[in-house]
Amino acid sequence: MADTFHNQDPKFHQGKILEHESDGIQEFDNPMPFWWSAIFWLTIGFAYVYFTYFVIGVGASVQREYQVDLGVFYQEQFGKLGELKPIPATILKLSSDPKMMKAAQGLYSANCVVCHAADGGGLTGPNLCDNEYINVKNVEDIFKVVSVGIVSKGMPQWSNRFSEPQLVLLTSYVAHLRGTTPAAPKAPQGVSIPPWITK
């Protein structure tokens, strides 16, 4: 039966009849179409690249995307931040407000982790968690660095993208990171400065 079927349409079948049989039935060894096999191998290749980039590489993890989305949510909730000014009292007050820090974390996660790491420990940019700072002597100096940037060092000018209240919020988050313990802190850079004070 199998030989008869094979001979009926020789152009369709490019495999061969296998030697063994069961109950008088022989199995036909017909290879999968090339396009089917290609999709299968492309799927495996894509999974490897995806895993390498997002799980063990630099791609945004599920946790980071969650933090960004959570930050966007809180920013919407606190959308009317009012006329926040970059003065020490305001920056430090925000840095001690957990809800505001959730909103600020979204800004930080979406824009700063590439250089400073998710926990502020530093990558190409400096560690934000220790007491050593390069261009900061007072807490309000963080606002200046965030706003104007230091282009020669790779620090972008975020005032082109964010409003002043958002920049104040981001400044407060950076101030909030001081004294925390990152997983892999970068070596201290700059000069040690005293604790934040309110003028």
Image: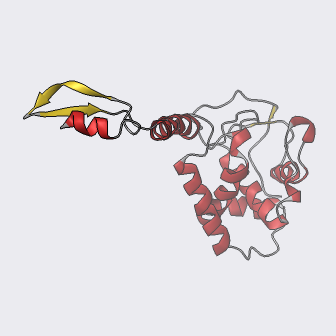
Q: In percent of the image, x 56 and y 46: which residue is there? A: 61
Scheme of colours in the image: secondary structure
Q: Do we see residue 99 in this rendering?
A: yes
Quadrant of the snapshot with the C terminus: bottom right
Residue 192's x, y, as percent? Answer: 78, 34
Q: Residue furthest left?
A: 23
- In the image shown, does 42 or 191 lie closer to the viewer? 42
Q: In percent of the image, x 45 and y 41: which residue is there? A: 36
Q: Decide: is 110 above or below 186.
A: below
Residue 116's x, y, as percent? Answer: 71, 40
- In the image shown, does 12 or 140 lie closer to the viewer? 12
Quadrant of the snapshot with the N terminus: top left
Q: In percent of the image, x 64 and y 65: which residue is there? A: 72
Residue 13's x, y, as percent? Answer: 36, 36
Which corner quadrant of the image does residue 120 belong to?
top right
Number of labels in the image equals 0
Which corner quadrant of the image does residue 118 belong to?
top right
Q: In percent of the image, x 21 and y 36: which residue is there? A: 2
- Residue 120 appears left or right of 22: right
- Residue 27 appears left or right of 73: left
- In the image shown, does 93 or 48 lie closer to the viewer? 48
Q: Do we see residue 96 in this rendering?
A: no
Residue 150's x, y, as percent? Answer: 90, 42
Which corner quadrant of the image does residue 70 belong to?
bottom right
- Residue 143 appears left or right of 173: right
